[in-house]
Amino acid sequence: MSELGFSTRAVHAGYEPDPQTGAVNVPIYASSTFAQDGVGGMRGGYEYARTGNPTRTALEANLAALELGDYGRAFASGMAATDCALRALLRPGDHLVIPDDAYGGTFRLIDKVFSQWGIEHSPAHIADLDAVRAAIRPNTKLIWIETPTNPLLSIGDISALAEIAHEAGAKLVVDNTFATPYLQQPLTLGADIVLHSTTKYLGGHSDVVGGALITNDAELDKAFGFLQNGAGAVPGPFDAYLTMRGIKTLAVRMERHCDNAQVIAEFLEGHPAISEVIYPGLPSHPGYEVAQKQMRRGGGMISVRLAGGREAALKFCSRTEIFTLAESLGGVESLIEHPGAMTHASTEGSELEVPADLVRLSVGIEDIADLLADVEQALI
Ligand code: PLP
Protein backbone atom coordinates (compact mmCIF):
# COMPACT_ATOMS: atom_id res chain seq x y z
CA MET A 1 0.00 0.00 0.00
CA SER A 2 2.84 2.44 0.79
CA GLU A 3 3.58 2.94 -2.94
CA LEU A 4 0.01 4.17 -3.58
CA GLY A 5 -0.97 7.83 -3.36
CA PHE A 6 -2.25 9.37 -0.13
CA SER A 7 -5.93 9.53 -1.08
CA THR A 8 -5.91 5.95 -2.36
CA ARG A 9 -4.43 4.76 0.93
CA ALA A 10 -6.93 6.84 2.89
CA VAL A 11 -9.87 5.25 1.05
CA HIS A 12 -8.64 1.65 0.80
CA ALA A 13 -5.93 0.78 3.34
CA GLY A 14 -6.92 -1.60 6.12
CA TYR A 15 -9.94 -3.22 4.54
CA GLU A 16 -10.82 -5.15 1.39
CA PRO A 17 -14.45 -5.94 0.46
CA ASP A 18 -15.67 -8.80 2.60
CA PRO A 19 -15.31 -12.06 0.56
CA GLN A 20 -18.58 -13.44 1.93
CA THR A 21 -20.89 -10.47 1.44
CA GLY A 22 -18.95 -8.04 -0.74
CA ALA A 23 -19.54 -5.24 1.80
CA VAL A 24 -17.33 -2.36 0.65
CA ASN A 25 -17.19 -0.78 4.10
CA VAL A 26 -15.71 -2.39 7.16
CA PRO A 27 -18.50 -3.93 9.27
CA ILE A 28 -19.01 -2.68 12.82
CA TYR A 29 -18.12 -5.88 14.67
CA ALA A 30 -20.31 -5.36 17.72
CA SER A 31 -18.93 -8.35 19.57
CA SER A 32 -16.99 -8.26 22.82
CA THR A 33 -15.91 -11.90 22.55
CA PHE A 34 -15.15 -14.44 19.81
CA ALA A 35 -15.97 -18.18 19.69
CA GLN A 36 -13.05 -20.59 19.95
CA ASP A 37 -12.71 -24.03 18.31
CA GLY A 38 -11.38 -25.84 21.34
CA VAL A 39 -9.50 -24.00 24.08
CA GLY A 40 -7.18 -21.43 22.51
CA GLY A 41 -8.42 -22.27 18.99
CA MET A 42 -9.08 -18.81 17.66
CA ARG A 43 -10.83 -18.78 14.28
CA GLY A 44 -9.90 -15.34 12.99
CA GLY A 45 -7.17 -14.35 15.43
CA TYR A 46 -9.58 -12.67 17.85
CA GLU A 47 -10.50 -13.73 21.37
CA TYR A 48 -11.70 -10.66 23.31
CA ALA A 49 -12.44 -7.15 22.02
CA ARG A 50 -10.18 -5.23 24.43
CA THR A 51 -7.27 -7.18 22.95
CA GLY A 52 -8.51 -6.83 19.39
CA ASN A 53 -11.63 -6.25 17.30
CA PRO A 54 -11.73 -6.51 13.48
CA THR A 55 -13.16 -2.99 13.00
CA ARG A 56 -10.34 -1.58 15.13
CA THR A 57 -7.77 -3.69 13.25
CA ALA A 58 -8.93 -2.12 9.98
CA LEU A 59 -8.58 1.37 11.43
CA GLU A 60 -5.13 0.59 12.84
CA ALA A 61 -3.87 -0.68 9.48
CA ASN A 62 -5.32 2.41 7.80
CA LEU A 63 -3.65 4.78 10.30
CA ALA A 64 -0.28 3.09 9.76
CA ALA A 65 -0.66 3.41 5.97
CA LEU A 66 -1.53 7.11 6.23
CA GLU A 67 1.67 7.86 8.16
CA LEU A 68 3.76 5.45 6.05
CA GLY A 69 4.47 3.54 9.25
CA ASP A 70 4.63 -0.19 9.91
CA TYR A 71 2.40 -0.32 12.99
CA GLY A 72 -0.71 1.57 14.14
CA ARG A 73 -2.62 1.42 17.43
CA ALA A 74 -5.98 3.05 18.07
CA PHE A 75 -7.07 4.40 21.46
CA ALA A 76 -10.20 5.71 23.13
CA SER A 77 -8.89 9.31 22.94
CA GLY A 78 -5.81 11.32 22.07
CA MET A 79 -5.03 11.53 25.80
CA ALA A 80 -5.27 7.74 26.14
CA ALA A 81 -2.68 7.46 23.33
CA THR A 82 -0.51 10.08 25.07
CA ASP A 83 -0.77 8.22 28.38
CA CYS A 84 0.20 4.93 26.68
CA ALA A 85 3.21 6.46 24.91
CA LEU A 86 4.50 8.12 28.10
CA ARG A 87 4.13 4.90 30.11
CA ALA A 88 5.79 2.80 27.43
CA LEU A 89 8.74 5.15 26.99
CA LEU A 90 9.50 6.51 30.45
CA ARG A 91 10.44 5.13 33.88
CA PRO A 92 10.77 6.88 37.26
CA GLY A 93 13.84 9.13 37.18
CA ASP A 94 13.56 9.83 33.44
CA HIS A 95 13.18 13.28 31.92
CA LEU A 96 11.38 14.58 28.84
CA VAL A 97 11.39 17.85 26.92
CA ILE A 98 7.98 19.28 25.99
CA PRO A 99 6.92 22.33 23.93
CA ASP A 100 6.61 25.55 25.90
CA ASP A 101 3.15 25.87 24.35
CA ALA A 102 1.97 22.27 24.35
CA TYR A 103 -1.70 21.28 24.31
CA GLY A 104 -3.03 21.97 27.82
CA GLY A 105 -4.19 18.39 28.39
CA THR A 106 -0.78 16.95 27.50
CA PHE A 107 0.90 19.40 29.86
CA ARG A 108 -1.62 18.60 32.62
CA LEU A 109 -1.02 14.85 32.33
CA ILE A 110 2.78 15.27 32.45
CA ASP A 111 2.82 18.02 35.08
CA LYS A 112 0.13 16.70 37.43
CA VAL A 113 0.19 12.92 36.97
CA PHE A 114 3.54 11.69 35.62
CA SER A 115 5.43 14.02 37.98
CA GLN A 116 3.96 11.95 40.84
CA TRP A 117 5.80 8.92 39.45
CA GLY A 118 9.17 10.66 39.38
CA ILE A 119 9.14 11.74 35.73
CA GLU A 120 10.70 15.17 35.20
CA HIS A 121 9.94 17.55 32.34
CA SER A 122 11.32 20.81 30.91
CA PRO A 123 9.41 23.10 28.57
CA ALA A 124 11.42 24.42 25.60
CA HIS A 125 10.57 26.54 22.57
CA ILE A 126 10.62 23.78 19.96
CA ALA A 127 11.19 26.25 17.09
CA ASP A 128 14.56 27.08 18.69
CA LEU A 129 16.89 24.12 18.25
CA ASP A 130 19.46 25.57 20.69
CA ALA A 131 16.77 25.91 23.36
CA VAL A 132 15.82 22.25 22.87
CA ARG A 133 19.51 21.18 23.05
CA ALA A 134 19.91 23.22 26.24
CA ALA A 135 16.89 21.52 27.85
CA ILE A 136 18.38 18.05 27.41
CA ARG A 137 19.75 16.36 30.55
CA PRO A 138 21.67 13.11 31.02
CA ASN A 139 18.37 11.38 31.93
CA THR A 140 16.39 12.74 28.94
CA LYS A 141 14.64 9.83 27.23
CA LEU A 142 12.10 11.69 25.15
CA ILE A 143 11.60 14.85 23.13
CA TRP A 144 7.87 15.37 22.77
CA ILE A 145 6.75 17.88 20.18
CA GLU A 146 3.68 19.14 18.41
CA THR A 147 4.20 20.91 15.10
CA PRO A 148 2.34 23.14 14.57
CA THR A 149 1.89 23.52 18.33
CA ASN A 150 -1.45 24.07 20.01
CA PRO A 151 -2.26 26.98 20.33
CA LEU A 152 0.67 29.17 19.22
CA LEU A 153 1.31 27.26 15.98
CA SER A 154 5.09 27.16 16.47
CA ILE A 155 6.89 25.04 13.90
CA GLY A 156 9.53 22.52 14.99
CA ASP A 157 12.03 21.23 12.42
CA ILE A 158 11.23 17.51 12.64
CA SER A 159 14.39 16.13 11.00
CA ALA A 160 16.67 18.41 13.05
CA LEU A 161 14.82 17.52 16.28
CA ALA A 162 15.04 13.81 15.45
CA GLU A 163 18.81 14.20 15.09
CA ILE A 164 19.05 16.06 18.41
CA ALA A 165 16.97 13.39 20.15
CA HIS A 166 18.93 10.48 18.72
CA GLU A 167 22.31 12.07 19.55
CA ALA A 168 21.10 12.28 23.15
CA GLY A 169 19.94 8.65 23.12
CA ALA A 170 16.30 9.79 23.29
CA LYS A 171 13.24 9.18 21.11
CA LEU A 172 11.22 11.81 19.25
CA VAL A 173 7.43 11.77 19.52
CA VAL A 174 5.54 14.05 17.12
CA ASP A 175 1.94 14.91 17.93
CA ASN A 176 0.78 15.33 14.32
CA THR A 177 -2.82 16.27 15.19
CA PHE A 178 -2.72 19.80 13.72
CA ALA A 179 -0.86 18.97 10.51
CA THR A 180 -2.46 15.56 9.82
CA PRO A 181 -0.63 12.92 7.74
CA TYR A 182 -1.96 14.62 4.62
CA LEU A 183 0.20 17.69 5.26
CA GLN A 184 3.21 16.07 6.95
CA GLN A 185 4.53 12.58 7.68
CA PRO A 186 6.96 12.74 10.62
CA LEU A 187 8.15 9.10 10.46
CA THR A 188 9.63 9.82 7.02
CA LEU A 189 11.56 12.72 8.59
CA GLY A 190 13.14 10.64 11.36
CA ALA A 191 10.55 10.75 14.17
CA ASP A 192 10.17 7.53 16.18
CA ILE A 193 6.49 7.80 17.04
CA VAL A 194 3.55 9.77 15.66
CA LEU A 195 0.59 10.55 17.88
CA HIS A 196 -2.86 11.74 16.86
CA SER A 197 -5.97 12.94 18.51
CA THR A 198 -8.15 11.36 15.80
CA THR A 199 -10.98 13.35 17.37
CA LYS A 200 -9.80 16.23 15.18
CA TYR A 201 -9.06 16.20 11.43
CA LEU A 202 -8.89 12.42 10.98
CA GLY A 203 -12.43 11.88 12.29
CA GLY A 204 -13.19 15.26 10.79
CA HIS A 205 -16.87 15.66 11.70
CA SER A 206 -16.81 16.41 15.45
CA ASP A 207 -18.71 13.20 16.18
CA VAL A 208 -16.12 10.84 17.65
CA VAL A 209 -13.28 10.93 20.20
CA GLY A 210 -10.16 8.84 19.55
CA GLY A 211 -6.38 8.65 19.49
CA ALA A 212 -3.58 6.83 17.70
CA LEU A 213 0.09 5.87 17.93
CA ILE A 214 2.06 4.93 14.82
CA THR A 215 5.67 3.70 14.64
CA ASN A 216 8.12 1.66 12.57
CA ASP A 217 9.69 0.15 15.68
CA ALA A 218 8.40 -3.38 16.37
CA GLU A 219 9.55 -3.33 20.01
CA LEU A 220 7.76 -0.05 20.68
CA ASP A 221 4.62 -1.27 19.00
CA LYS A 222 4.73 -4.37 21.18
CA ALA A 223 4.96 -2.17 24.27
CA PHE A 224 2.04 -0.05 23.05
CA GLY A 225 0.02 -3.19 22.34
CA PHE A 226 0.76 -4.57 25.79
CA LEU A 227 -0.48 -1.38 27.47
CA GLN A 228 -3.41 -1.01 25.08
CA ASN A 229 -4.65 -4.42 26.20
CA GLY A 230 -3.32 -4.22 29.76
CA ALA A 231 -4.80 -0.81 30.57
CA GLY A 232 -7.71 -1.07 28.15
CA ALA A 233 -8.18 2.48 26.79
CA VAL A 234 -9.45 1.18 23.44
CA PRO A 235 -12.05 2.59 21.04
CA GLY A 236 -15.24 0.64 20.52
CA PRO A 237 -16.04 -0.72 17.04
CA PHE A 238 -18.53 2.04 16.23
CA ASP A 239 -15.92 4.71 17.05
CA ALA A 240 -13.33 2.87 14.95
CA TYR A 241 -15.78 2.73 12.04
CA LEU A 242 -16.67 6.44 12.29
CA THR A 243 -13.01 7.41 12.37
CA MET A 244 -12.31 5.30 9.30
CA ARG A 245 -15.25 6.83 7.50
CA GLY A 246 -13.88 10.30 8.26
CA ILE A 247 -10.39 9.41 7.05
CA LYS A 248 -11.64 8.51 3.58
CA THR A 249 -12.20 12.22 2.81
CA LEU A 250 -9.20 13.61 4.70
CA ALA A 251 -7.31 14.79 1.61
CA VAL A 252 -10.22 16.69 0.07
CA ARG A 253 -11.23 18.18 3.40
CA MET A 254 -7.67 19.32 4.16
CA GLU A 255 -7.34 21.08 0.80
CA ARG A 256 -10.49 23.07 1.57
CA HIS A 257 -9.45 23.76 5.19
CA CYS A 258 -6.14 25.10 3.87
CA ASP A 259 -7.74 27.17 1.08
CA ASN A 260 -10.14 28.82 3.54
CA ALA A 261 -7.56 29.35 6.30
CA GLN A 262 -5.08 30.97 3.91
CA VAL A 263 -7.67 33.53 2.75
CA ILE A 264 -8.81 34.32 6.31
CA ALA A 265 -5.23 34.62 7.60
CA GLU A 266 -4.37 37.06 4.81
CA PHE A 267 -7.52 39.09 5.55
CA LEU A 268 -6.80 39.21 9.30
CA GLU A 269 -3.19 40.25 8.73
CA GLY A 270 -4.34 43.60 7.45
CA HIS A 271 -7.06 44.15 10.07
CA PRO A 272 -6.59 46.98 12.61
CA ALA A 273 -8.26 45.00 15.45
CA ILE A 274 -5.61 42.28 15.16
CA SER A 275 -2.09 42.82 16.50
CA GLU A 276 -0.65 39.51 15.27
CA VAL A 277 -1.75 36.72 12.95
CA ILE A 278 -0.04 33.36 13.53
CA TYR A 279 -0.47 31.06 10.53
CA PRO A 280 2.29 28.79 9.14
CA GLY A 281 1.17 29.53 5.57
CA LEU A 282 2.03 33.24 5.88
CA PRO A 283 5.57 34.42 5.05
CA SER A 284 5.40 36.54 8.25
CA HIS A 285 5.35 33.36 10.40
CA PRO A 286 8.81 32.76 11.91
CA GLY A 287 8.55 29.07 11.02
CA TYR A 288 7.45 29.68 7.42
CA GLU A 289 10.64 28.28 5.81
CA VAL A 290 10.58 25.10 7.91
CA ALA A 291 6.84 24.71 7.30
CA GLN A 292 7.43 25.02 3.54
CA LYS A 293 10.05 22.29 3.82
CA GLN A 294 8.07 19.74 5.82
CA MET A 295 4.38 20.59 5.33
CA ARG A 296 2.38 20.39 2.11
CA ARG A 297 0.34 23.52 3.03
CA GLY A 298 -0.32 25.80 6.04
CA GLY A 299 -3.17 23.84 7.64
CA GLY A 300 -6.60 24.84 8.90
CA MET A 301 -5.70 26.45 12.23
CA ILE A 302 -5.10 30.19 12.77
CA SER A 303 -4.26 31.94 16.03
CA VAL A 304 -4.61 35.71 16.41
CA ARG A 305 -3.82 38.25 19.10
CA LEU A 306 -6.28 41.09 19.56
CA ALA A 307 -5.02 44.66 19.71
CA GLY A 308 -7.69 45.39 22.36
CA GLY A 309 -6.40 42.69 24.77
CA ARG A 310 -8.40 40.05 26.68
CA GLU A 311 -11.74 41.90 26.53
CA ALA A 312 -11.50 42.27 22.76
CA ALA A 313 -10.56 38.59 22.46
CA LEU A 314 -13.59 37.48 24.50
CA LYS A 315 -15.84 39.82 22.49
CA PHE A 316 -14.56 38.42 19.17
CA CYS A 317 -15.30 34.88 20.39
CA SER A 318 -18.84 35.76 21.40
CA ARG A 319 -19.76 37.71 18.24
CA THR A 320 -19.15 35.20 15.47
CA GLU A 321 -22.22 33.45 14.07
CA ILE A 322 -20.87 30.78 11.71
CA PHE A 323 -17.70 30.15 13.73
CA THR A 324 -19.19 28.30 16.72
CA LEU A 325 -17.71 29.08 20.14
CA ALA A 326 -16.50 25.65 21.24
CA GLU A 327 -13.44 23.65 22.24
CA SER A 328 -11.84 21.16 19.82
CA LEU A 329 -10.90 21.62 16.18
CA GLY A 330 -10.50 19.90 12.85
CA GLY A 331 -14.18 19.29 12.03
CA VAL A 332 -15.93 20.42 8.87
CA GLU A 333 -17.55 23.26 10.80
CA SER A 334 -15.62 26.40 11.79
CA LEU A 335 -14.94 26.88 15.50
CA ILE A 336 -13.57 29.75 17.57
CA GLU A 337 -12.22 29.66 21.11
CA HIS A 338 -10.28 31.55 23.79
CA PRO A 339 -7.43 29.14 24.71
CA GLY A 340 -6.59 30.94 27.99
CA ALA A 341 -10.08 30.36 29.39
CA MET A 342 -10.92 27.13 27.56
CA THR A 343 -8.57 24.46 26.11
CA HIS A 344 -5.47 25.74 27.89
CA ALA A 345 -6.94 26.83 31.24
CA SER A 346 -4.75 24.17 32.92
CA THR A 347 -1.61 26.13 31.93
CA GLU A 348 -2.59 29.21 34.01
CA GLY A 349 0.26 30.35 36.25
CA SER A 350 2.73 27.92 34.61
CA GLU A 351 5.54 28.51 32.13
CA LEU A 352 3.07 27.39 29.46
CA GLU A 353 0.44 30.04 30.21
CA VAL A 354 -1.00 31.35 26.94
CA PRO A 355 -1.53 35.07 26.18
CA ALA A 356 -4.89 36.42 27.37
CA ASP A 357 -5.43 38.27 24.08
CA LEU A 358 -5.17 35.05 22.04
CA VAL A 359 -8.04 33.61 19.97
CA ARG A 360 -7.80 30.31 18.09
CA LEU A 361 -9.77 29.63 14.91
CA SER A 362 -10.39 26.19 13.46
CA VAL A 363 -11.35 27.07 9.91
CA GLY A 364 -13.94 24.72 8.46
CA ILE A 365 -14.94 23.85 4.91
CA GLU A 366 -17.91 26.24 4.57
CA ASP A 367 -18.07 28.86 1.79
CA ILE A 368 -15.20 31.27 2.16
CA ALA A 369 -17.37 34.35 1.47
CA ASP A 370 -19.59 33.48 4.44
CA LEU A 371 -16.62 32.82 6.74
CA LEU A 372 -14.94 36.09 5.78
CA ALA A 373 -18.16 38.06 6.31
CA ASP A 374 -18.60 36.41 9.72
CA VAL A 375 -15.09 37.27 10.90
CA GLU A 376 -15.41 40.79 9.55
CA GLN A 377 -18.71 41.53 11.33
CA ALA A 378 -17.42 40.03 14.60
CA LEU A 379 -14.40 42.33 14.67
CA ILE A 380 -16.31 45.61 14.27
N1 PLP B 1 -3.00 16.63 21.11
C1 PLP B 1 -3.45 17.79 20.64
C2 PLP B 1 -2.56 18.67 19.81
C3 PLP B 1 -4.76 18.20 20.93
O1 PLP B 1 -5.21 19.37 20.47
C4 PLP B 1 -5.59 17.35 21.73
C5 PLP B 1 -6.96 17.75 22.08
O2 PLP B 1 -7.37 18.86 21.87
C6 PLP B 1 -5.06 16.15 22.21
C7 PLP B 1 -3.76 15.80 21.85
C8 PLP B 1 -5.89 15.23 23.07
O3 PLP B 1 -6.80 14.54 22.30
P1 PLP B 1 -8.27 14.04 22.82
O4 PLP B 1 -9.06 15.27 23.12
O5 PLP B 1 -8.77 13.24 21.67
O6 PLP B 1 -8.02 13.22 24.04
Image (cartoon, grey):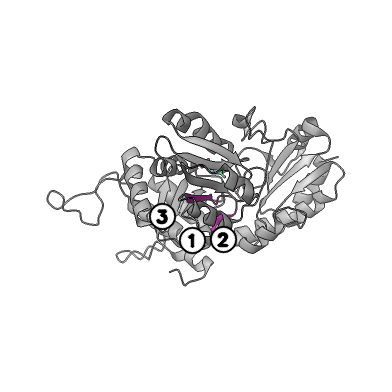
For this orientation, the residue located farthest to the bottom is 3
Which is more N-terminal, label 2 or label 3? 3
For this orientation, the residue located farthest to the left is 38
Q: Which label was assigned to residue 300?
A: none
Residue 301 in the image, given as x and y percentages of width and height:
67, 49
Graded by Cα atoms within 10 Å as few (under 14), some (14 to 19) or many (20 or more), the crowding at tag 1 reads many
Mark 3–mark 2 Cα distance, whole angstroms, equals: 16 Å
Residue 377 in the image, given as x and y percentages of width and height:
82, 43
Q: Which label was assigned to residue 72?
A: 3
Q: What element carries label 3?
A: strand
Q: Which label was assigned to residue 66?
A: 1
- Residue at horizontal 82 percent and vertical 40 percent from the top: 379
Kindly tell me whether residue 65 is visible in this rendering.
Answer: yes
Which is more N-terminal, label 2 or label 1? 1
Q: Does the magenta stretch include residue 295?
A: no
Residue with the mark numbered 2: 182
Magenta residues span 171-181
